[in-house]
Image (cartoon, coloured by chain):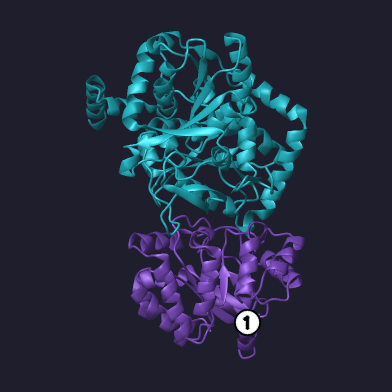
Chain colours: A purple, B cyan
Amino acid sequence: MQLEQQLRNRLQHKKILLMTHIVLGYPSFEANREVIAQMVHNGVDCIEMQIPFSEPMADGPVILKANQKALSRGTKVTESLAFGAEMAATYDIPFLYMTYYNIIFKYGEQAFMKECQRAGIQGLIVPDLPPEEGADYLHLARENGIAPIMIYAPTSPDERMQELDGHGAGFIYCAARRGVTGTKSEFGDEFNTYLERCQAATKLPLAVGFGIQDRNDVNALKGKADIAVIGSQTIKLVDEQGPSAVGPFIASLR
Amino acid sequence: MNKKGFFGNWGGAYIPEILFQTFQELNHEFEVCKKDSSFWQEYIDLMSTYSCRPTPLTHATNLSRYFGGAQIYIKREDLNHTGAHKANNVMGQGLLIKRMGKKRVIAETGAGQHGMATATMAAKFGFDCTIYMGEEDVLRQRPNVFWMEKMGATVIPVTDGSRTLKDAINEAFRDWVTNVDNTHYALGTVCGPHPFPEMVAWFQSIIGMEAHEQILKQHGRMPARVYACVGGGSNAIGVFKRFIEEPDVELIGVEAGGHGLETGEHAARLCGTGASPGVAQGYKTMFLQDDDGQMLNTHSVAAGLDYVGVSPILTDLWEQGRVRFEAATDKEVMAALDLTMKKEGLIPALESSHAFVQAFKEAPLLSGDDAIIINMSGRGDKDIFTIAHAFNDPSWKEFIIDRAREYSR
């Protein structure tokens, strides 16, 4: 599919790609705009934009707070979608939405997919929608040329990984460990065995997320994964030092 | 159930991948237990020796006479150990945890009753125990927090979101995805991802099984109506389940009307117009949410009813027209509680008092030959701070002021 091909093209020139995460409307759309500009100019290959939800069950404290603050500022789904469309039209890298299923369900799955397709959004990450409950979603995503990203976990058995591979497109998002977003992972033997199991289960590129914080973490993934995902770390950085700190941080990861 | 884990259009298992394997194991264990009659017997034995089962069905003769209509019977879940129906579910899940070989149990709690019951079960079975409780509920239900801690549980106040039950559930899920290998999440109500609604309903169905037998013995025939309060819905499903197959028994669920449905400050999902279909906390049901799908804040004087979602099983029964839903306001609840104490010497929990409100409205309209059952899901003395505050009781206030003075010396 389209997203996978774009990532493969980029992988011809880089050993590992960087994917970053932002929460839409946090701290503001204006700040989102500046952060994304810095990310793109410093070599980020793909950005997942989280449409905030009031019950972000799979997120840790940093992203949870960002979701709540974005909502208390009055961030609406339609604004998020308009902003996403603007970014996809402005920059030549793939943009994805990450959100929880209720946001898509309430908007209407068909309408949501059409909106993504029109806006040039390449993929969707929905952590609380396993394929068993997402038949319509999976069908509509493919029909509209949008990659439904599947998630692997260290607790997923081999057969389960293969099954998920059959439903997914674009790449596979591998949660590096048990737990929520934003906590440091240990890249030990157990982790390597897990990534080997992931590789064996799919031909799609592998993205590894949850707790990547510096260049050493990114380097540790080279040769084992295709995409390093930086999530909570840039949100913390913007909180502490403002949007202008994001560029130098991203540059320091390579 | 048709599609796996669905009751009509409602339910399912909308879970993150990290929990997939643990749900496979839980589903497997639950299926094995359901088919194993010795498991149910072990459960009954435990509940009759450790808790107070069967709980009595009390003929409230004074209230019946006072309203001059139906004979009012009260199912006494308040007489369970820990003071509420919550023990039924928790002790059942405790037996499951033992079979699964897990060593740690976590739970969310609103009113604190489920947390209390879980801490009790953990102490009895020797599990480590962590309870997540919304900060607002910690303040409302301080005595329960005290007992949970005394029984060895760690109580973590949840400071995110609306700081009530739904936020405690989110936080418990976050713990679970982190510690999934050794931990079981003992969800307290008939909500959440499959198999929880079915499993909790199974353990709670003991209430209705007993009540069915008792009403036949005491009244000679089926009741006209059965009333239960509905937060998540576990005591309601528990008492309703056996009666669903009795077509002439009307089932009434009473939701939290809070300050009144017109104020928007309530937790009425199925009897109002504020709720719409949604998916959150792992299941599909009618949620109080805005047009974007963001959950709304709810209000009730009763912490245990202060919840945005409702059991998928009840939503299905509502859609089929099998259960009627009503709401009771905070004010009506205090009046019903007052009357029940004065007339019968019973202290229903604020949650349970919602069911009494609706039963009191309808009892005079029925004949003296009819019986109605009110499920008294818990006892109210745990709510002493909230109840005394709501009654604005002068001698209680004086006591608190004196005690505070003594402590601050």
Secondary structure of the residue carrying tag 1 is helix
Residue for point 53% across, 30% down: B235
Residue A160 location, x and y as percent?
A: 73, 61
The quarter holding residue B96 reads top right
The answer to whether residue B50 is seen in the rendering is yes
Instruction: Please give the count of numbered marks on the rendered protein.
Output: 1
Residue for point 50% across, 75% down: A20
User: From what the image shows, is residue B396 above or below residue A123?
Assistant: above
Residue denoted by label 1: A2
User: From what the image shows, is residue B269 above or below residue A59?
Assistant: above
Residue B181 location, x and y as percent?
A: 65, 50
Residue B1 location, x and y as percent?
A: 67, 42
The quarter holding residue B240 reads top right
User: From what the image shows, is residue B37 above or below residue A158?
Assistant: above
Residue type indicated by callout 1: Gln
Which is nearer the eye, B113 or B408?
B113
Q: Residues within 10 Å of mark 1 (few under 14, many from 20)?
A: some
What chain letter is assigned to the residue under label 1?
A: A
Residue for point 63% across, 31% down: B203
Which is nearer the eye, B391 or B81?
B391
Which is nearer the eye, B42 or A75?
A75
The answer to whether residue A15 is seen in the rendering is no
Which is nearer the eye, A165 or B354?
B354
Residue A66 location, x and y as percent?
A: 40, 63
